[in-house]
Image (cartoon, rainbow, N blue to C red):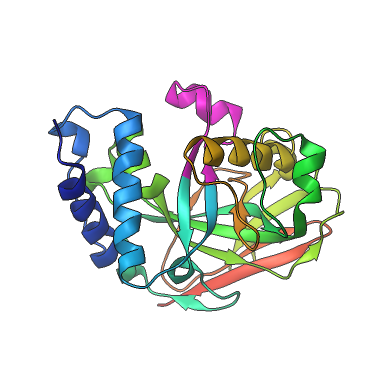
Amino acid sequence: MIDIAKIAKVVDDAARNAKAIPQISAKHKISVEQGYAIQSAAFSRRMARGETQVGIKMGFTSRAKMLQMGIDDMIWGRLSDNMLIEDGDEINLSDYVHPRAEPEIAFLLGRTINHPCTAAEALAAVDAVAPAIEIIDSRYKNFKFSLADVVADNSSSSGFIVGSWALAETDLSNLGMILDFNGRPVQIGSSAAILGHPIRSLTAAARIAAAAGEPLQAGWIIMAGGATAAESLKPGVTVRNSVQDLGFAGFKVSD
């Protein structure tokens, strides 16, 4: 029997102090369900320090990534107010272990979403949409991990940036997305890469969160998942995700 609370402390300390840790699965045989239990316990430690949950992030929202990982469903992680980086702000790489940026779409919920729900019902609960970037950061040494390790590590979520909010009615089905470093494109994709349509990620989030006993709440931000591969961050770059019809979100990395 593994000690969930003890491992959660190790994972939480790794994220808090930006220190790489060995794979949990190298020492303990853990299931994905136990990974989520560790994630929940680690996030509870954040809450005990005064952080507030402000949403969730979805991961593995591309079919190719699911096939690569040998899974048939998405993963998810929790977002706190302390993880929110204001649009245009600067971060320091010393606060991370293996930081990478993913271009995303964010949803702002106007009311709670229960499951089951249709895409139309999920969209009706959305107050606004925005271009966004997630900073993912695996805390494991040598960037090696199992699926359960990833889940335990808050599904690699470390920070997120949200641009200006736009109308919820904006057609998100196939918007061009460009992630650039200092104005040079490093990843080019489309919102259609997010499960074929980002709203499908939102309905999946409603299903997954409800199953965990944590329905999506009014006021929460839901990060729909990466539209392209993640790009490793470098010192001195200005990062921007430009999304057709929505605008952009960005941040700076200190030298």
Query: In the image, 17: left or right of 77?
Result: left
> Which residue is pictured at 47% across the width and 23% down the height?
71
Quarter of the rendering containing residue 227: top right
Query: Is 224 drawn above or below residue 25 in the view shown?
Result: below
Residue drawn at x 29%, y 61% is 45
Where residue 127 sits: x, y (%)?
77, 60
Q: Where is residue 98 in the image (x, y as percent from the top left)?
A: 34, 55
Locate residue 197: give its quadrant: top right
At which x and y percent is residue 95?
32, 69
The residue drawn where x is 74% and y is 44% is 122
Q: Left or right: 97 with respect to 161? A: left
Q: Is residue 26 left or right of residue 146?
A: left
Residue 231 image position (x, y, % from top left): 50, 52
Q: In which quarter of the image is the C terminus?
A: bottom left
Answer with left or right where residue 167 lies relative to residue 186: right
- Looking at the image, how many numbered discs can be counted on the residues? 0
Q: Residues in magenta? A: 58-76
Would you place residue 124 above or below residue 23 in this image?
Answer: below
Quadrant of the frame with the N terminus:
top left
State whether residue 6 is above or below residue 247: above
Q: Can residue 150 be seen in this view?
A: no
Residue 60 part of the magenta segment: yes
User: Depth check: 93 or 7 in front?
Assistant: 7
The quarter of the picture where residue 234 lies is: bottom left
The answer to which of 229 and 77 lies nearer the viewer is 77
Q: Nearer the viewer, residue 118 or 195?
A: 118
Is residue 107 in sight in this rendering? yes
